Image (cartoon, rainbow, N blue to C red):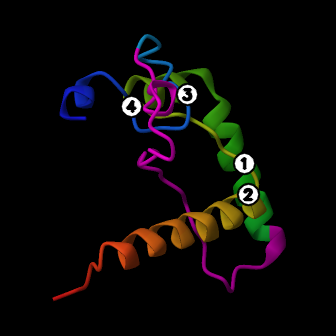
């Protein structure tokens, strides 16, 4: 697998900036998705109307060609989405990494 480190990406889809580089899954390594992701969160006390407005504005910004291109140039996959999608994704990622941490017996020292 060491040989694959410079020949595959650990994302669930190819990166626009590196279209020739396959994903680990395409090479037969299932569940090898360890891509970094970024999100903006607001306090749980933020009124829903304000959270929705902030979300809509951020999605507009992410759709601006110059913003999308700049992020793509850094190797990011630009998604955006709804507050519910982010919440669901956060819960899913937390559960996924909890399993990995428990299986590997990782502990804070």
Q: Is residue 86 above or below residue 43?
A: above
Query: Considering the numbered disc 3 on the image, is that residue within a helix, a strand or a loop?
Result: helix
The answer to which of marks 3 and 2 sits earlier in the sequence is 3
Q: Nearer the viewer, residue 36 or 20?
A: 20
Residue 69 numbered mark, or none: none
Whether tag 1 and tag 2 are in contact, CB under 8 A, the answer is yes
Judging by the rendered image, the residue that carries numbered circle 4 is 9
The answer to which of marks 3 and 4 sits earlier in the sequence is 4
Residue 85 numbered mark, or none: 2
Residue 68 numbered mark, or none: 3
Residue 49, image x, y percentages = 84, 70
Residue 14, image x, y percentages = 51, 25
Residue 77, image x, y percentages = 53, 34
Front position among marks 4 and 2: 4
Front position among marks 1 and 2: 2
Query: Considering the numbered disc 2 on the image, is that residue within a helix, a strand or a loop?
Result: helix
Whether tag 3 and tag 2 are in contact, CB under 8 A, the answer is no
Whether tag 3 and tag 1 are in contact, CB under 8 A, the answer is no
Query: Considering the numbered disc 4 on the image, is that residue within a helix, a strand or a loop?
Result: loop
Query: At 66% across and 83% down in the image, what residue appears?
Result: 44
Q: Which residues are magenta?
A: 21-49
Q: CA distance from mark 3 to mark 1?
A: 14 Å
Apparent side of residue 13 relative to residue 104 in the rendered image (left or right): right
The answer to which of marks 4 and 1 sits earlier in the sequence is 4
Q: CA distance from mark 4 to mark 1?
A: 23 Å
Query: At 50% across and 41% down in the image, what residue appears?
Result: 30
Q: CA distance from mark 1 to mark 2?
A: 6 Å
Q: Is residue 79 above or below residue 56?
A: above
């Amino acid at each position: 697998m060491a040989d694959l480190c410079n020949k595959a990406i650990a994302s669930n889809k190819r990166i626009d900036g590196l279209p020739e580089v396959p994903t680990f899954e395409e090479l037969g390594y299932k569940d090898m998705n360890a891509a970094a992701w970024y999100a903006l969160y607001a306090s749980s006390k933020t009124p829903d109307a304000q959270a929705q407005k902030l979300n809509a504005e951020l999605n507009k910004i992410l759709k601006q060609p110059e913003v999308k291109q700049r992020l793509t140039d850094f190797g990011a996959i630009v998604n955006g989405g709804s507050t519910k999608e982010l919440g669901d994704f956060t819960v899913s990622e937390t559960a996924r990494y909890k399993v990995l941490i428990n299986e590997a017996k990782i502990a804070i020292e």
